[in-house]
């Protein structure tokens, strides 16, 4: 698994790692049931602290993207069910992004067109579960 981290970014490394794994799942680069590297291996591969990887994996587990078993390690979870918490997160983060975009002069048409192009271009897989 190829992970690119930006150590100069204000985004914490564990968040960057979490985001890259989620993007990998969404694009289909990481398949359902596929194992992730062990915490130790991931930390060595990308030259970060094991606790940083543990934190990212814990967040992914809590969000329903992976399952962790002591014998088999971390694997991509078969389902990611839609929850009320997630829809609240989407609305909150989109509201902030729309507001920032508007303040910076981005027009609604451009914003929506860009969202649609990105959504379509990511080749996002539909996982089993609820959808809206």
Image (cartoon, rainbow, N blue to C red):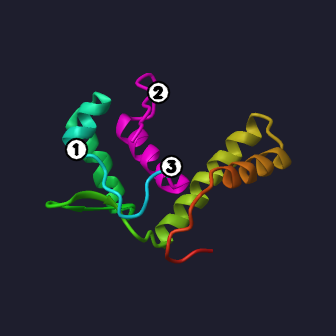
Outermost residue toward the top in this view: 8
Instruction: Name the residue carrying label 1.
Output: 39
Task: Give the secondary structure at mark 2.
Answer: loop
Placement of the C terminus among the 4 image quadrants: bottom right
Using a 10 Å C-alpha cutoff, classify the residue at mark 3 as few (fewer than 14 neighbours), some (14 to 19) or many (20 or more).
some
- Nearer the observer: mark 1 or 2; the answer is 1
Q: Please tell me which of labels 1 and 2 falls first in the chain.
A: 2
- Nearer the observer: mark 3 or 2; the answer is 3
Q: Please tell me which of labels 3 and 2 falls first in the chain.
A: 2
Residue at 75% from the left image edge and 46% from the top image edge: 114
Residue at 53% from the left image edge and 77% from the top image edge: 130
Q: Please tell me which of labels 1 and 3 falls first in the chain.
A: 3
Vertical side of 17 occupied by 90: above or below: below
Instruction: Name the residue carrying label 2.
Output: 9
Task: Give the secondary structure at mark 3.
Answer: helix
Q: Are marks 1 and 3 in contact (CB under 8 Å)?
A: no
Placement of the N terminus among the 4 image quadrants: top left
* Total marks in image: 3
Cα distance in 3D space between marks 1 and 3 = 19 Å
Q: Are marks 1 and 2 in contact (CB under 8 Å)?
A: no
Instruction: Name the residue carrying label 3.
Output: 23
Task: Give the secondary structure at mark 1.
Answer: helix
Image location of residue 47, percent across then percent down: 28, 27
Between 76 and 54, which is closer to the camera in this rendering?
Answer: 76
Cα distance in 3D space between marks 3 and 2 = 18 Å
**Magenta-colored span:** 1-28
Q: Quadrant of residue 91?
A: bottom right
Image location of residue 72, percent across then percent down: 19, 60
């Amino acid at each position: 698994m190829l992970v690119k981290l930006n150590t100069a970014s204000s985004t914490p490394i564990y968040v960057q790692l979490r985001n890259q794994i989620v993007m990998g799942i969404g694009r289909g680069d990481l398949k359902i049931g596929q194992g992730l590297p062990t915490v130790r291996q991931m930390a060595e591969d990308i030259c970060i602290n094991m606790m940083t990887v543990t934190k990212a994996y814990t967040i992914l587990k809590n969000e329903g993207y992976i399952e962790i078993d002591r014998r088999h390690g971390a694997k991509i979870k078969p389902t990611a069910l839609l929850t009320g918490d997630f829809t609240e997160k989407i609305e909150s983060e989109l509201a902030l992004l729309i507001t920032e975009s508007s303040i910076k002069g981005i027009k609604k048409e451009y914003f929506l067109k860009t969202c649609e192009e990105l959504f379509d271009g990511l080749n996002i897989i539909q996982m089993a579960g609820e959808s809206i």
